[in-house]
Image: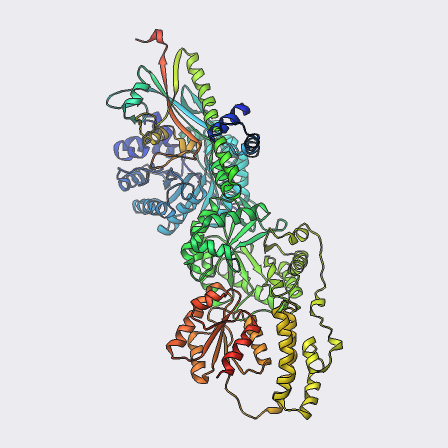
């Protein structure tokens, strides 16, 4: 994990425009003190794309994605790599605890954890994408429920298909939100190389 | 601990169904209705492989998860299929709701409980022989399911949690904490399933075997899951699985089976691997403990500090926060104490205006979502304690039960049911004064609690700290009692340290020295303010001594004359001096010219904080002795009707304050009718009707008994009483006095004398 990149991104996320040594030091300190609480866990599974209309379905998985956005994203895809990531429950608890004792550190940790989760999830998904690409496919970026017109309820479908609760301790609320908070669920398209496409 | 025979469970269902075409993300439980023959065939294969128990295909069959399904039909069909397979026993399988409970998530404890209760009733109706609660990450949810199973069926209940490579569940629970908590809650077996492979699980299983007071159950996966071609696979072969399970059997695990990826071949291999063994006996650790969801605190393992600050008595800000529902303030207090070194936090929300039954569980829920420290639930209300015990994610300490009949009858069963560690307070219909009395109380408490089914290891004795201001010997008597209780009864002890210095100067010094003395006597867990600096030295083991006699030595030798003797608290020669004075003077003159001016002088100094309570009491004692001399001479002159009726109200037995008021009133020449402590409303009304005394003084020390004060005043008014009512006691304030309908607030004994002068002399 590139610490400098992480801190810079967290800094931007907090809305800072001008350089502020103090704020930077705070972020660095908070990262150092809490990094051990981060327990990144990742799970993914590859499914062949079934039908695309009226909703996208995958063969071998009990999922059905409505809307135009996911259809567009998976247009031409042979497979979909469902993936889920969480930073773990202890981070949420610490952010809450700090909000009572040291509110500024709570805000800082919240930003750092968000960025860390994003970067770590990209890294872990990236490894899977590389493996797939090495076998002669192209892959897309992670498309998440909530993007375009893919509803948040798709989080629950993907979560069940990946057994995220059992495997990485991620739960999806009835409203489709993820707990622990620093978690990501998404769909990555797997496409035959352009030259190979029919 | 030893179980007679192994009980062999079956292996996986979900992964077996996936191999037969179940789609990822689809509910395997639907197969009970759509493809029963597939489910039955899998069950039969496990029975043939040697499984004693077949687990019904009901893992995720929960009305919360399967919203549009007929869950009752799915569960009942599941049990029927398992029975049809011919297993010796059929387990109803339950797991988590898949969402987090409050405050981390949105699901309420009550809703989760209702779902589990339904599942359990359906399962029992269909003929299940036992309930298996498995793959749990959230200790609170596991507890909720266990309570629902116990309260809605007569079936044995087995509970297994699932752990990660770091030895904790996703929500941070470790195996020792889960084992201590769930065995205390009377699970019939506890253990581990899923998560890891059998080999990886061994160190965690060892921990469970060390602490489980019930049989241990283990159902591992067929090795760690690996992803191959985008799919999860389990690669541990049956023989290696059997080998690792044999290790577990040797550790004392008596219930064995498999989870994800295991097949009938794994169960066959397991059965073969342990064929020549019988369950190994275990040497179970009998520990005194309190747990949160993520931490176990062992009492007796060094000094355990119990933080006292979450208690509104005498804390204006906390009281305001509780009244306004501002839990943030409480969280901050909790975190501050945790950071300052508290191992356990006492939680008390006893305010007359608050419904403890609602507020205590609410505060407990918030606290356990924020701090890791185990909690000590502090209340005298059985409803509040039970409500809080239910939603507490661990094994709490209950503070406290005493020797009063209703306390034992109401609170001991709650401690037993919820597996709490319980504080037995040395208090009954009377209060102990000497160490011998304290020991006798403690002995009775231990035997009464043992009779209720609570083990000695789950009992903590509070030897009851009373201030040295009223009795100089109390520090030593308490410390001696701690030593005796520790050595002779073999139980651990707690003490509310700062009570020792109530009404004294130099409180910090006295508290620190007292703590040091009690720790040396073997005190396990002091209840104190962990942020107070004075405790640092004694807690670090430094021995402190303090000669408190200086506080009680008022230059008695040089006292001269009656006034001088009173002023210096010199009781030695007062009788002689009064007798001599009576030869030449009227008793009333002695009272007015000697006693009262001396008491006034001391009283004024007390008001200004120049002298402290012991001095005032000592003066009153001298006066009492002098009065006794006069009374003897006046004997036979007939009983006079009282000026003041005094009572400690119903439910309260703290009468030190009331007795001080009485002594001081008598010193000033008022006739007092003392009704004692724990006095019912009717008795106060009857006393007034009989005597028509112009002033009634009511005292209450505990927040919980302030309402009795109001009831007594209401009853007096209803009876047409014309007496003025003054109220006092540690928790009373001017506002409370008004609220309960009193005419006066007697902030201390001296103030009460002034009130009596106003009321009685105006008569």
As drawn, the residue found furthest toward the front would be: A18
> Front-most of B209 and B370?
B370
Dividing the picture into quarters, in which one does residue A76 lie?
top left
Up the image or down, B83 lies above or below A167; here it is below
Look at the image and tell me whether residue B249 can be seen: no
Residue B36 quadrant: top left
Which is nearer the eye, B523 or B76? B523
The one of A112 and B155 positioned closer to us in this rendering: A112
Way the structure is coloured? rainbow
Q: Residue furthest left?
A: A54
Residue at image position (63%, 51%) is B303
Q: Position of residue B288 (x, y in %)?
A: 56, 51
Task: Pinpoint residue B613: horizontal percent, then vertical percent.
Answer: 62, 69
Q: Quadrant of the C terminus of chain A?
A: top left
Q: Going 71% across and 56% down the picture, which residue do you hit?
A: B544
Instruction: Tell which of B91 and B385 is nearer to you.
Output: B385
Q: Eyeballing the image, is B763 above or below A47?
A: below
Is A97 drawn above or below residue B688 in the view shown?
A: above
Image quadrant where residue B42 sits: top left
Q: Is residue B113 left or right of residue B669?
A: left
Residue B475 x, y percent position in the rendering? 65, 64
Q: Residue at x 52, y 88 (%)?
A: B640
Q: Is residue B195 above or below residue B476?
A: above
């Amino acid at each position: 994990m590139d610490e400098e990149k992480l801190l810079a991104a967290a800094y931007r996320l907090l809305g800072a425009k001008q350089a502020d040594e103090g704020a930077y030091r705070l972020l660095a300190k908070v990262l150092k003190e809490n990094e051990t609480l981060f327990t990144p866990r990742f799970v993914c599974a590859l499914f062949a794309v079934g039908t695309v209309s009226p909703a996208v379905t995958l063969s071998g998985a009990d999922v059905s994605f409505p809307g135009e956005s996911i259809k567009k994203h998976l247009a031409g895809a042979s497979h979909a790599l469902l993936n889920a990531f969480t930073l773990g429950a202890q981070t949420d608890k610490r952010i809450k605890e700090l909000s009572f004792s040291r509110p500024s550190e709570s805000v800082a940790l919240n930003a750092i954890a968000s960025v860390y989760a994003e970067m770590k999830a990209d890294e872990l998904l990236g490894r899977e994408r590389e493996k797939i690409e090495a076998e002669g496919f192209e892959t897309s970026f992670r498309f998440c429920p909530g993007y375009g017109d893919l509803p948040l309820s798709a989080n629950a479908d993907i979560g069940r298909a990946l057994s995220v609760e059992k495997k990485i301790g991620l739960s999806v609320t009835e409203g489709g939100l993820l707990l622990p908070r620093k978690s990501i669920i998404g769909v990555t398209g797997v496409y035959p190389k352009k030259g190979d496409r029919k | 601990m030893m179980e007679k025979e192994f009980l062999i469970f079956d292996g996986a269902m979900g992964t077996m169904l996936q191999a037969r075409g179940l789609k990822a993300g689809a509910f395997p439980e639907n197969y009970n209705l759509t493809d029963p023959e597939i489910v039955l065939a899998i069950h039969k294969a496990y029975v043939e492989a040697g499984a004693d128990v077949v687990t019904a295909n009901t893992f995720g069959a929960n009305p919360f998860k399967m919203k549009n399904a007929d869950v009752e039909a799915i569960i009942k069909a599941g049990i029927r299929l398992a029975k049809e397979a011919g297993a010796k026993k059929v387990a109803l399988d339950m797991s988590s709701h898949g969402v987090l409970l409050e405050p981390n998530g949105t699901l309420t404890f009550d809703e989760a409980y209702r779902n589990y209760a339904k599942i359990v009733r359906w399962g029992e109706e269909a003929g299940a022989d036992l309930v298996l609660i498995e793959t749990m990450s959230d200790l609170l949810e596991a507890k909720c399911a266990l309570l629902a199973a116990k309260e809605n069926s007569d079936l044995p209940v087995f509970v297994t949690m699932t752990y990660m490579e770091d030895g904790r569940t996703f929500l941070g629970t470790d195996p020792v904490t889960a084992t201590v908590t769930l065995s205390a809650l009377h699970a019939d077996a506890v253990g581990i399933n899923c998560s890891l492979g059998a080999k990886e699980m061994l160190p965690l299983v060892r921990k469970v075997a060390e602490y489980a007071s019930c049989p241990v159950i283990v159902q591992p996966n067929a090795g760690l899951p690996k992803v191959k071609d985008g799919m999860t696979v389990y690669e541990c072969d049956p023989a290696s699985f059997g080998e690792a399970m044999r290790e577990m059997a040797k550790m004392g695990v008596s219930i064995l089976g498999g989870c994800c990826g295991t097949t009938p071949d794994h169960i066959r291999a397991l059965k073969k691997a342990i064929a020549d063994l019988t369950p190994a006996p275990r040497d179970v650790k009998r520990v005194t403990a309190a747990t949160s969801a993520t931490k176990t605190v062992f009492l007796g393992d060094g000094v355990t500090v119990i933080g006292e600050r979450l208690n509104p008595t005498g804390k204006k800000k906390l009281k305001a926060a509780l009244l306004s529902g501002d839990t943030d303030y409480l969280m901050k207090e909790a975190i501050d104490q945790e950071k300052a070194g508290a191992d356990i936090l006492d939680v008390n929300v006893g305010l007359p205006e608050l419904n403890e039954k609602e507020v205590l569980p609410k505060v407990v829920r918030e606290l356990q979502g924020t701090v890791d420290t185990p909690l000590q639930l502090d209340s005298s209300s059985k409803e509040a304690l039970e409500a809080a015990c239910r939603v507490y994610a661990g094994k709490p300490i209950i503070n406290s039960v005493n020797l009063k009949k209703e306390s034992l009858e109401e609170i001991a069963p709650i401690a037993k049911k919820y597996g709490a560690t319980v504080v037995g307070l040395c208090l009954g219909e009377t209060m102990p004064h000497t160490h011998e009395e304290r020991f006798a109380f403690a002995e009775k408490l231990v035997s009464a609690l043992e009779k209720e089914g609570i083990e000695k290891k789950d009992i903590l004795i509070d030897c009851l700290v009373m201030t040295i201001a009223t009795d100089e010997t109390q520090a030593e008597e308490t410390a001696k009692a701690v030593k005796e209780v520790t050595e002779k009864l073999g139980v651990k002890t707690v003490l509310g340290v700062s009570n020792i210095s109530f009404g004294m100067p130099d409180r910090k010094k006295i508290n620190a020295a007292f703590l040091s003395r009690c720790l040396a006597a073997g005190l396990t867990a002091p209840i104190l303010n962990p942020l107070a600096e004075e405790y640092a030295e004694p807690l670090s083991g430094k021995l402190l001594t303090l000669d408190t006699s200086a506080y009680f030595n008022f230059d008695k030798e040089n006292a001269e004359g009656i006034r001088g003797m009173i002023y210096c608290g010199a009781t030695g020669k007062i009788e002689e001096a009064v007798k001599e004075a009576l030869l030449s003077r009227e008793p009333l003159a002695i009272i007015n010219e000697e006693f009262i001016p001396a008491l006034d002088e001391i009283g004024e100094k007390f008001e200004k904080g120049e002298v402290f309570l012991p001095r005032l009491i000592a003066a009153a004692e001298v006066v009492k002795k002098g009065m006794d001399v006069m009374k003897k001479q006046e004997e036979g002159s007939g009983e006079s009707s009282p000026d003041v009726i005094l009572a400690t109200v119903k439910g309260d037995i703290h009468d030190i304050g009331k007795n001080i008021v009485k002594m001081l009133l008598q010193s000033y020449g008022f006739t007092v009718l003392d009704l004692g402590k724990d006095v019912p409303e009717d008795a106060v009304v009857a006393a007034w009707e009989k005597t028509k005394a112009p002033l009634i003084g009511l005292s209450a020390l505990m927040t919980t008994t302030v309402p009795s004060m109001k009831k007594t005043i209401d009853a007096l008014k209803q009876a047409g009483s014309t007496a003025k009512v003054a109220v006092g006691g540690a928790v009373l304030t001017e506002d409370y006095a008004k609220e309960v309908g009193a005419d006066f607030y007697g902030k201390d004994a001296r103030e009460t004398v002034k009130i009596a002068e106003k009321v009685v002399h105006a008569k």
